[in-house]
Image (cartoon, rainbow, N blue to C red):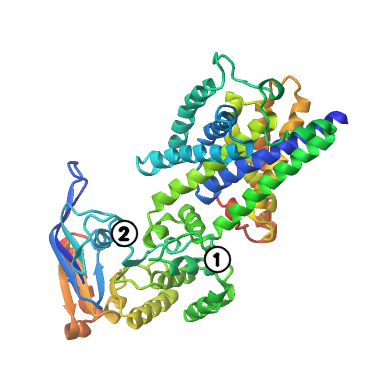
Amino acid sequence: MLDLLHIDKTFHHGTANETTLFSDFSLTIARGEFVAVVGSNGSGKTTVLNLISGSLLPDHGQVLLDGEDMTNRPPYRRARRIGRVYQDPALGTVPHMTIRENLALAENKGKPYGLSLCLSRKKNAYYRELVAELGLGLEEKMDIPVSLLSGGQRQALSLLMSTLTPVDLLLLDEHTAALDPKTADRVMALTERIVREKGITTLMVTHNLRYAVEYGDRICMFHAGKILLDRGGEEKKATRVDDLLSLFQSISIECGN
Amino acid sequence: MQLFFSTSIDGLQMGLCFAILALGVYLSYSILDFPDLSVDGSFPLGGVCCTILMLRVGLPPLLAIPGAMVVGILAGMVTGLLHVRCRISPLLSGIIVMTGLLSVNLALTRLLTKTGQTTTIFSYRSEGLRGIFHPAFLDDLSPTARDAVTIGILFLFVLAIKLLLDLFLRTRLGYLLRATGDNASLVVSLGRDAGSYKILGLALGNGLCAVSGGLYAQLFMSYDNNSGSGKVVLALASVIIGTAVFSRMRLVKPTTAVVIGALIYSLCLNYLVLIDRDGIYLKLLNAVLFAAILIGHERLSAWREKHLGHTAHREGEKKDA
């Protein structure tokens, strides 16, 4: 489904700060797989997401989606097949538009944005139903600008919007990191439900080791641009938070932190 | 009293002209979050193009207006392309286009006169210009009735443009344009190139500015190369006054608020002329008025937040303070 092949990526070329993050990095994700990626800061988690979405280009190597070469496509063309939820709840919605307007905008993804009216009364019941399923009481706030919602509510809405139309791949970029623990749990449970219901191939970057262990079919730990640990299937199910934590600590000691 | 009355009439007429300019700037400034300085160039561009289309090409005055709009759209596209494709900052892209248009307008003006000496090039009777506002039968009416007709025609223009803009902003394309100014990364997530929509918005905004310039030239039956100076300030002030005054009233559409803002500001400007008859301090008074509006707006927002609990969340208001 998704193949990152032989990726090289160096930052700050030709300066004193030159750092090579990836050299000959490869990662393959199968269709329908839900992969959780953990790792310390600077390990390359977010860079991988950026390479997939196109906001960063690799120095060498290829990004394939369903065997199709995406490497040189601009972000907006890749986004037609990819959904993404960011860490910052403000990035996934249009703040000055209402919930209804946001949904109408997201629902049209993949179709032309022409001169027909965006809102339609016929859709109101459908939108309400969608929002009610989030279980946050947002169905009573359909005509309120999203900027007035809480971070958790916005993030739930972002998740809903990014998966409203069929996408081949869902990228979750620490999407619960800015939320309080209880709301984060709620958004995570919601993520699981949506991903499973729709069978979307998902790549989730998280700092929360518990989420990485509890959710998803496969867990990868990144360190300095390498995949240190990659467990799927039964092996993944047997993995405990403590296993990850001890590995994490051993790396940290190695780095002198 | 007579002077006050005629000043008010003038202010109203100019205000209706500038309302279209303000709607154009509302599109770029409020909707796209793009402070577009090229407006100072596209307003006179619309004026000179409209004049050329009537005097040299012989188009009827009503058709010269959309003609001017097309040229304004092209100017806006240049600003947009400089910003989006060449990655020049919004302010600088606007300044570049504004500066370039000074010469373009001057060159176009030369098409209108044989000698190219004067910038004010024609008057109604001697050159035979018949603008929208001066059909023959008007000559027989009293000046007051003539003014009323002028205001009526201008009002219809503004109303039509405002309604069309409202309608456009409710279409899928309009929604995407609003999203581009608010959160461009979401537009990218939707699989659309946010840059193209910026260019589109700037093109439309400058198109409206050119329409305003064309109407203005027809209204006063003259075109002046200097008519562009201060138009950005005028339009921004109109947008800010409108959105500040009506920000709490959800029933008043932002576009309506902007039109009313333009009327208020133009009236104020015309009353300033009454104070400063020589016109020496006019621009200074203009600047002071604008500053006073901004300060007042700031105070008002702070007061509202303190006493009414939450900030207003109207579109046009978001980046004003």
Residue B92: percent from the left, percent from the top?
43, 35
Q: Are marks 2 and 1 in contact (CB under 8 Å)?
A: no
Residue B302 shows in the view: no
Q: Residue at x 64, y 31 (%)?
A: B217
**Viewer-proximal residue, B174 or A62?**
B174
Seen in the image, is A163 located left or right of residue B163? left
The residue pinned by badge 1 equals A98
Above or below — where is B261 with respect to B103? Answer: below
Q: Of helix, strand and loop, which one carries label 2?
A: helix
As measured in the structure, the alpha-carbon distance from the residue carrying label 2 to the one carrying label 1 is 26 Å
Q: Chain of mark 2?
A: A
**Displayed quadrant of residue B46:** top right
- The label on residue A77 is 2
**Viewer-proximal residue, B199 or B276?**
B199
- The kind of residue tagged 1 is Thr
- The kind of residue tagged 2 is Arg
In the rendered view of the protein, which quadrant contains the N terminus of chain A? bottom left
**Viewer-proximal residue, A120 or A35?**
A120
Q: Residue at x 38, y 58 (%)?
A: B192
Above or below — where is B248 with respect to B112? Answer: below
Residue B165: percent from the left, percent from the top?
59, 52
Above or below — where is B201 with respect to B230? Answer: below
